[in-house]
Amino acid sequence: MRAIALSAMALLWAVPALAGTVISAGPSNVSVTIYRDPNRRQGAMDRNWPGGYALISETRTLRIPAGESVIRFEGVAEGMLPESAIVSGLPEGVREKNRDARLISPAGLVDANLKRRVTLRRTHRKTGKTIEQDAIIQAGPDGGVILQTAEGVEALGCSGLPERMLYGGIPDELSAKPTLSVLARSEREVTATVQLSYLAQGFDWSASYVAEMAEAGPTLGLFAWLTLANGGSQGFADADLQVVAGRPNRESADRGPRATAAELHLACWPMDITSTHPSWGIVRTPTRPPSAPVSYDVADDIIVTAQRRTGSVMSAPVAIAAVQEDLGDLKLYRVPSRVTVAAQGQKQVAMIDRPEVVVDRLYSADMGDGGENPRPLAILLTSRNVKEKGLGIPLPAGGLALFEPVDGHSLLVGEDDMADRAIGEDIEIHAGDSPDVRWSLKPLSRDNRHQRWHATISNARDVPIRAQIVIPYELARKPKGIERGKGGWLLKADVPAQGTVELDYEIKVEGRSRR
């Protein structure tokens, strides 16, 4: 027994007492670098659920006492991946890291006070008299809250009276903000400048293109906003902001920690018909989960860092525009001034401005969509990403809105998804279907190996047009004007104004071409 007691005393002596808790409420400087959703190859981001991630680097100044202490970094992103956190600048490094994911919420308070005594306050509807009584939370918060009082067992929100619960205090296990706590040690009291860097989910960005056709000539103006989204409840004020285009090699990770049972739903079965007591039925205590997806349904939610020209959908020269840099094989866009990455919000910063991009108008049809009844051809605006065409810059993926001037007004004529386009690559913008350019397709003959087809393209416009038929099969013989392209063989033809072109071709029945 004496040996056991001495061993216990030695163990207590070997573990020094904590000197205290150091709370860092927020950073003095922060940098946010946002990476796109790795599963999104083209088009705009999912605004309801940002699927990308961010690298967040913070600078914090701490007064660290002598001995061992717990340092709490409050206000980190709630989608933080704690295994990615790097803390530098502490006198003797970090001995332990903990992500405090349970946040204060109606459901969190219920969950933290299970089997504990609370105060139930009810107000009479007619007299306004308030009655308070003790209650014990027996079950909750999933599926409702069950209370035990001196009168028996009942469900919260089902008495027909306005009621609420009062708590004696906030449990220690609940945090007002997402927090990372570390265990550190210092030989003496020091003031340290600490760098905290970590990855966090719940961010995303994409390019938002606005293209406007010129009133005269085969050119369009191309402008792009850098649109970013923060789906979390933590904002980052006056941050250095960068976004990265490309796909870094990163293994998939689970969704970041979320607050436990953040929503509190109270449901009751009415004791009378709903027409007699319309307010009875479902009683809810609504709250948005801190890490729930955010909906951006109105344009007013977007903070735009720029000016706009009167009477045009294109932007004027802006005071703040992202600057493109190389990051290895990736592309980095740096915002030259500090911006606020607001919680559960979006921001737009000017990104690309090319006022005169030379384009060709092409009318295209896919053989698989053809039939003997005339059908409209799709309108494609094609170009090449080179300086000679007015571009010659990397074009990140995003959504595109195409406008065309009509009687002094810009009207929307098409929307499309843009994939990443490197310098030198071809560009296609889908601008809808043309009712004036139509085509039909009918079979002529067929044997065991070949099938012949006859296509007719008619142009009701007052100008000649260039058209193509996409053939996703191997050809038995190559007619004049055929070339390889996206989707298969491209059979092209010039159709005169108010004219018609007849095309014949023959395919192999046994196989398709490789796309």
Image: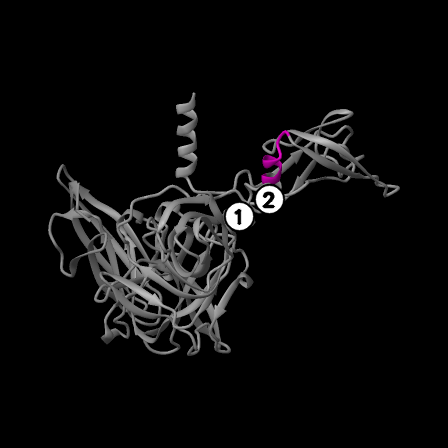
| For the residues bearing labels 2 and 1, Cβ distance under 8 angstroms | yes
Q: Amino acid at mark 2?
A: Ser
In the depicted view, which residue is nearer to us: 132 or 308? 132
Residue 486: image quadrant is: bottom left
Q: Residues within 10 Å of mark 1 (few under 14, many from 20)?
A: many
The picture places residue 293, in percent across and down from the top left corner, at: 49, 48
User: Which of the labelled discs sits on residue 290, or is there none?
Assistant: 1
Q: Residue furthest front?
A: 2
Q: Distance of mark 2 from mark 1, alpha carbons?
A: 9 Å
Q: Residue furthest top?
A: 1
Q: Is residue 136 left or right of residue 181?
A: right
In the depicted view, which residue is nearer to us: 483 or 124? 124
- The answer to whether residue 226 of the structure is visible from this angle is yes
Q: Amino acid at mark 1?
A: Pro
In the depicted view, which residue is nearer to us: 319 or 235? 235
Residue appearing at x 39%, y 24% in the figure: 3
Residue appearing at x 55%, y 38% in the figure: 261
Give the structural element (helix, strand or loop) at label 1.
loop
Q: What span is colored magenta in the figure? A: 108-115
Task: Say whether residue 110 is magenta.
Answer: yes
Q: Is residue 267 left or right of residue 8?
A: right
Q: Which residue is mark 2?
A: 105
Q: Residues within 10 Å of mark 2 (few under 14, many from 20)?
A: many
Q: Is residue 301 left or right of residue 372?
A: right
The colour mode here is one colour
Residue 404: image quadrant is: bottom left
Residue appearing at x 46%, y 72% in the figure: 313
Task: Say whether residue 64 is magenta.
Answer: no
Give the structural element (helix, strand or loop) at label 2.
loop
The picture places residue 142, in percent across and down from the top left corner, at: 58, 32
The picture places residue 335, in percent across and down from the top left corner, at: 39, 69
